[in-house]
Image: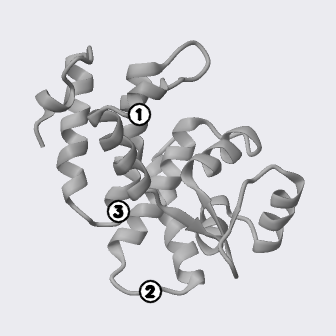
Amino acid sequence: MDIIEMTKGISLSEETISKIEQIIKLSVQSKYQKKQKLSRMVDSVLSDLFKNDYSFLIPRDFLDTELGIFLFTVKYANQYYYTTFDLEILLDRPKSNLYFHRNQGHLKLINRGKSYEATERDLRKFMENYDGLSPRDVDKRFEAFWNIKASSDKKISRKVFKEQFKIELEQLKGPL
């Protein structure tokens, strides 16, 4: 992909151009552990381009540009949906508590037939707003989760995964 042609007519900083180049490189790879990073990088580029004081608003005409189409294709093709098993680990809560928070409107879960799933964005919102975790602590939880997910070649039991997650999370937190 030619980044110069893709971004023609759009004013970008060198840092944003660098992020777009990284997204292009990562989008060619298909490993599932890259999904989270790709989605975050796209969000970062969109934030660089359209952030205002409270959030960011994306103009409709941007969505029709080559860059807009590319960024949203990468974002939605690489979005990872966390299962209830994943949520139990990340949030350290039993499944019944997850459903309670879904019913109360605290946690947005997507019904996938026989199971429920959540996006990283919804989980972050829940952990920061409801659990009161800092963005840094939330990042550490996701990093620990993905470190274990990437390191295990085969499916491991829930109990073993939870134990490994707690160990990994403590190592990421480091000494106080």
- Residue 56 in sight in this render: yes
Which residue is label 3 attached to? 33
Please rate how many residues cluster around mark 2, counting C-alpha atoms within 10 Å: few if below 14, some from 14 to 19, many from 20: few
- Color scheme of the displayed model: one colour
**Sequence-wise first label, 3 or 2:** 3
The three-letter amino acid code for the residue at tag 1 is Leu
Mark number for residue 168? Answer: none
Tell me the SS state at disc 3. Answer: helix
Question: Which numbered disc flags the more N-terminal residue, 2 or 1?
Answer: 1
Tell which tag, 2 or 1, sits nearer the viewer: 1
Give the amino acid type for the residue marked by disc 2 in the picture.
Answer: Lys
Viewer-nearest residue: 95 or 47: 47
- The residue that mark 2 highlights is 155
Q: Is residue 8 above or below residue 77?
A: above
Indicate whether 39 appears above or below 116. above
Between 55 and 148, which is closer to the camera in this rendering? 55
Instruction: State which tag comes first along the sequence, 1 or 3.
Output: 3
Which amino acid is tagged 3?
A: Gln
Mark 1, Cα crowd under 10 Å, few <14 / some 14-19 / many 20+, is some
Name which residue lies at 48% across and 23% down. Answer: 59
Residue at (39% x, 22% y) in the render:
48
Which residue is identified by label 1? Answer: 63
Q: CA distance from mark 3 to mark 2?
A: 15 Å
Q: Is residue 136 left or right of residue 14?
A: right
For disc 3, the neighbor class at 10 Å (few under 14, some 14 to 19, many from 20) is some
Q: Secondary structure at mark 1?
A: helix
